[in-house]
Image: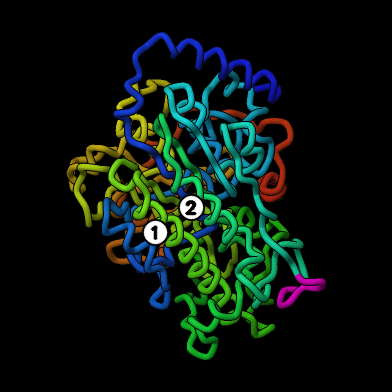
C-alpha cells in the first residue's frame, strides 16, 4: 500500500489470478453499501430521539434485520472506516485517529479492502461520496466524486463562531441541488438503472449529518425550533468518572464546549439542525432505495446501511464523537439480503467490523480467516441466536469499551474503569464499577480486552492531541 501504483499492480495480479477459477458471477447477488456520516441512534427504528424523522431508514429496516446494538470500532471517522473496510481492529493496525490513511499502515500492506476483494472476485465496483475516509477513487472501478464533500458554506459562520471551520449549524444553502448528498443520490440512481453483465458492488456515502449541520429550510420546517426536545442530561453525570476519562473526550479543541452551547442559547438550534440534517440524509437514502426498487436489480441485491460512529449533542456535557460511551459508539446497522427474514431486530452486540465477513458469506465468497470480525449471517437467520462476541471499541491505545447485550465496560489507559447496565440505566448515568455484586460481570467483560495492541503509527493526529493531553495529566498526577 505504499503507493497508488503498487496498490493497482497488486490488485491487477489478484484479478488475473482469479480469472482461472469459475466465478459464476452472474449468479451472485449485487451489493449496495450505504454509509451515513456521523449518524447516531437518532433514528426512528432505534428510538434514540422522539422527534427523529427517518422514514426511509425505517422502511429499510422492515425489509431485513436491524442490529439495534451495533457499535463502531472507533469513534472517529478514519479508524472506524479503515477497520470496517479491512476487517481489522484499530488496535491491530495502529490506525487510531484521523491520520494516517490505511494505505500507510505497514500491517495492511497487500491486504485487499472490501471493494477490492469483490473486484478480485468478478464484481464491477462503483462508489460516490464518502465510503473511505479519503482517496475513494483508488479503491473502485468507477468513482462519482465527492461533489464538494461537506458541501457549500456561507461567507461567515451562522451559529458557532469558534473552533474548527466545519463546526457550524443552521439553514443553508437555498436549494437541495447544491448539496453533495443530492448529487450522490442522483449518480447512484443513474448507475442502478443500468444493466450489467457481471454483479456490481455500489457504495453510496452521504455526508450529512456530519458538521456543518446545514440543510435547506424545508428540512428545518419539519423540526420547528420551539418544539425541539433536548436530550436527557444529568447535571452531575460526570461526577463518578475519572479525570482521565473526562480529559480524553474533552481535550480535542474541535467541537464547542457544552457550557458555551447552553449559554449562547444554541442548544435547541443545534439539536434542530442535527435532526434536520438527518432527515435530509434520510431523504437522499430514499432516492437511492426508490431507484433500486425500480431497477432490474431489486430482487438480487444485498443492501447494508451503516453509520461510522455515534455523536453527542450535550449528553455527558459534550458534543461530537470521540468517546467510549454509548452515545459515541452506537450506530445504525441494517442488513437486507434476498431470501432472508424481514422485519426483525437483533439486540446481540454487532460490530461494523462484521460487515466485511457478512458480505463475503452472503455473496458466496470464501471467508478470510485473517479478518477479526464475525459473519452476522447466523443472526440474520435467527436474531436471538447464542452470540458470545462483544463489540469492542477503542479510542487510542489503552482505551477500550466492551459492549455486550445489556452492559458496557470501559477501561482507560490510566487504569480507570466504568461499568453500566443498560437494563436499568440506558443513559449510562451510574458508574457501577465499584459495586461488589458485579465483580464477576466486570471480570468477564475485562477478559475481552486485547492482550496486544499496535503502537501509534507515525502521522496520527487530531485525537492524538487529546490522547497525549490525558496521558500528560496522568503523569502529572503521579508526582
Task: Let me know if residue 156 is in the magenta part.
Answer: yes
Residue, x 29% and y 51% (percent of image)? 405
Does residue 299 appear left or right of residue 140 in this picture? left
- Placement of 152 over or under 67, stated as above or below: below
| SS for callout 2 | helix
Q: Position of residue 336 (x, y in %)?
A: 30, 47
Q: Position of residue 1 (x, y in %)?
A: 64, 22
Q: Is residue 415 visible?
A: no
Camera-side residue: 298 or 455?
A: 298
State yes or no: discs 1 and 2 in contact (Cβ < 8 Å). Answer: yes
Camera-side residue: 102 or 301?
A: 301
Q: Mark 1 to mark 2: distance in Å?
A: 8 Å
Residue underneath mark 1:
290
Query: What's the magenta region?
Result: 154-160
Does residue 13 appear left or right of residue 22 in this picture? right
- Placement of 91 over or under 209, stated as above or below: above
Q: Position of residue 44 (x, y in %)?
A: 36, 68
Residue, x 73% and y 77% (percent of image)? 158
Q: Earlier in the sequence, mark 1 or mark 2?
A: 2
Residue underneath mark 2:
189
Q: Position of residue 408 (x, y in %)?
A: 38, 52
Amino acid at each position: 500500500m505504499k503507493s497508488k501504483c503498487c496498490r493497482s499492480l497488486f490488485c491487477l495480479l489478484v484479478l488475473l489470478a482469479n480469472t482461472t477459477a469459475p466465478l459464476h458471477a452472474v449468479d451472485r447477488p449485487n451489493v449496495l453499501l450505504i454509509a451515513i456520516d456521523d449518524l447516531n441512534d437518532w433514528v426512528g427504528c432505534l428510538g434514540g430521539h422522539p422527534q427523529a424523522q427517518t422514514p426511509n431508514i425505517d422502511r429499510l429496516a422492515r425489509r431485513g434485520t436491524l442490529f439495534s446494538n451495533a457499535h463502531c470500532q472507533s469513534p472517529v471517522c478514519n479508524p472506524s472506516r479503515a477497520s470496517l473496510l479491512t476487517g481489522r481492529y484499530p488496535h491491530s493496525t495502529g490506525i487510531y485517529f484521523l491520520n494516517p490513511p490505511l494505505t500507510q499502515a505497514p500491517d495492511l500492506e497487500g491486504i485487499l479492502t472490501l471493494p477490492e476483494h469483490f473486484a478480485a472476485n468478478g464484481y464491477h465496483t462503483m462508489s460516490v461520496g464518502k465510503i473511505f475516509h479519503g482517496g475513494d477513487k483508488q479503491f473502485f472501478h468507477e468513482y462519482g466524486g465527492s461533489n464538494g464533500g461537506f458541501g457549500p458554506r456561507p461567507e461567515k459562520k451562522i451559529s458557532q463562531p469558534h473552533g474548527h471551520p466545519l463546526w457550524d449549524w443552521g439553514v443553508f444553502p437555498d436549494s437541495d441541488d447544491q448539496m453533495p448528498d443530492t448529487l450522490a443520490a442522483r449518480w447512484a440512481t443513474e448507475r442502478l438503472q443500468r444493466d450489467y453483465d457481471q454483479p456490481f458492488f455500489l457504495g453510496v456515502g452521504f455526508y450529512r449529518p456530519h458538521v456543518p449541520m446545514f440543510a435547506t429550510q424545508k428540512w428545518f420546517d419539519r423540526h420547528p425550533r420551539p418544539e425541539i426536545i433536548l436530550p436527557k442530561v444529568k447535571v452531575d453525570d460526570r461526577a463518578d468518572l475519572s479525570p482521565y476519562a473526562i480529559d480524553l473526550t474533552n481535550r480535542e479543541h474541535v467541537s464547542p464546549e457544552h457550557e458555551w452551547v447552553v449559554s449562547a442559547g444554541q442548544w435547541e438550534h443545534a439539536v434542530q439542525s442535527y435532526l434536520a440534517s438527518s432527515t435530509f440524509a434520510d431523504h437522499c437514502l430514499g432516492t437511492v432505495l426508490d431507484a433500486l426498487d425500480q431497477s432490474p436489480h431489486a430482487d438480487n441485491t444485498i443492501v447494508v446501511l451503516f453509520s461510522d460512529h455515534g455523536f453527542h449533542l450535550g449528553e455527558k456535557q459534550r458534543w461530537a464523537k470521540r468517546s467510549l460511551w454509548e452515545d459515541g459508539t452506537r450506530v445504525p446497522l441494517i442488513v437486507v439480503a434476498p431470501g432472508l427474514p424481514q422485519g426483525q431486530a437483533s439486540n446481540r452486540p454487532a460490530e461494523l467490523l462484521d460487515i466485511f465477513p457478512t458480505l463475503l458469506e452472503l455473496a458466496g465468497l470464501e471467508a478470510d480467516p485473517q479478518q477479526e470480525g464475525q459473519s452476522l449471517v447466523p443472526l440474520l437467520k435467527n436474531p436471538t441466536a447464542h452470540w458470545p462476541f462483544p463489540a469492542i471499541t477503542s479510542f487510542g491505545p489503552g482505551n477500550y469499551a466492551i459492549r455486550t447485550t445489556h452492559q458496557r465496560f470501559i477501561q482507560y489507559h490510566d487504569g480507570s474503569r466504568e461499568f453500566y447496565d443498560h437494563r436499568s440505566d440506558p443513559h449510562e448515568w451510574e458508574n457501577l464499577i465499584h459495586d461488589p455484586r458485579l465483580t464477576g460481570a466486570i471480570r468477564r467483560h475485562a477478559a475481552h480486552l486485547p492482550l496486544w495492541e499496535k503502537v501509534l503509527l507515525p502521522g496520527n493526529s487530531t485525537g492524538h492531541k487529546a490522547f497525549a493531553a490525558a496521558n500528560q495529566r496522568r503523569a502529572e498526577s503521579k508526582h
